[in-house]
Amino acid sequence: MGNVIITGSNRGIGRAVLEKFAVNKWNIWAHTRVKNTEFEAYVSRLASENHIWIKPVYFQLGDEEQIKKGVKEIFFDKEEIHALINNAGIGHYETFQRTSMQKAKELFDINFFAPYLISQLVLRKMILQKGGAIVNMSSIAAIDVNEGDSVYGAAKAALNLWTKDLAAEVGRFGIRVNSVAPGPVDTELLKDNHLKKLTPSSLTEKSAMGRIADVREVANIVYFLSTNEASYINGEVIRVDGGRK
């Protein structure tokens, strides 16, 4: 079907996105931060089962030189890149006054500047190809007002506006850029210490469906936006939140 780069593909939404593309016969560059033998064995099995290739790529999202080296490694394969999924990111749930400048910069580095740089590099190839799709992983924290989301939400809001502006720039090259903004999703992120203040009831009470999302429900939207089925969807931020009350 095509070739796709997926960042943060070793767990949570990223792994669900990886599996969605694999079963639909896409070849994949699967990014993770560090070399992981368990993950390599997993993607090897997944590739064999679906008769595709999956190539692990390793780099830290907070390191500009590592990002450039990782993308250069992808370019060495001399394959077309039909889709880029900027999935990787970090969460944070804390009041503004208790969020240090160091943490704020980390949130912007990984949640905004990393996808910014990766896209800037990959777009060189997509423009030459005259086509491609970029899907950025945002959050409803970038849209709705919630105490404790001020810095994380600001980083994701920057991602959303950049998504829209970039879509306006590159649409003439046949390239589409969209964001997916999930509500609470059943991932390890919800178990992280920085989210310990969020109880199960607080996560579900605002959803019209009374539950949090499964990772596959988010992956389905990411995949759709990457395909020709979404050929006229561009510059959008798609909420996946079960209907907010």
Image: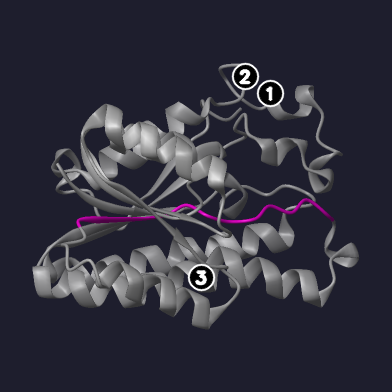
Q: Nearer the viewer, residue 194 or 27?
A: 27
Which residues are the magenta region? 82-94
Left/right placement of residue 11 relative to residue 43 reads right
Say which quarter of the image contains residue 104: bottom right
The reply to whether discs 2 and 1 touch (Cβ–Cβ < 8 Å) is yes
Q: Secondary structure at mark 3?
A: helix
Q: What x and y, as percent, mark residue 201?
A: 78, 22
Residue at image position (68%, 52%) is: 91
Q: Residue 208: x percent and y percent?
A: 57, 20
The disc, 1 or 3, on the residue closer to the chain's N-terminal end is 3
Between marks 1 and 3 in the image, the one whose residue lies nearer the viewer: 3
Helix, strand or loop at disc 1?
helix
Query: Image point 16% across, 73% down: which residue?
Result: 127
Residue 37 visible within the image = yes
Q: Is residue 1 left or right of residue 46?
A: left
Above or below for 235 versus 66: above
Reading the image, the residue beneath label 1 is 204
Task: Nearest to the eye among marks 2 and 3: give it.
Answer: 3
Residue 45: mark in rendering: none
Amino acid type indicated by mark 3? Ala
Mark 2 or mark 3: whose residue is earlier in sequence? 3
Residue 182, visible in the rendered structure: no
Q: Tell me if label 2 and label 3 are in contact, CB under 8 Å.
A: no
- List the residue tagged with mark 2: 211
The C terminus, quarter of image: top right
Q: Which residue matches tag 3?
A: 114
Residue sitting farthest toward the right: 98
Residue flagged by tag 2: what amino acid is it?
Arg
Judge the density around disc 3: few (<14), some (14-19), many (≥20) Cα neighbours within 10 Å: many
Taking the image as shown, residue 39 lies to the left or right of residue 46, namely right
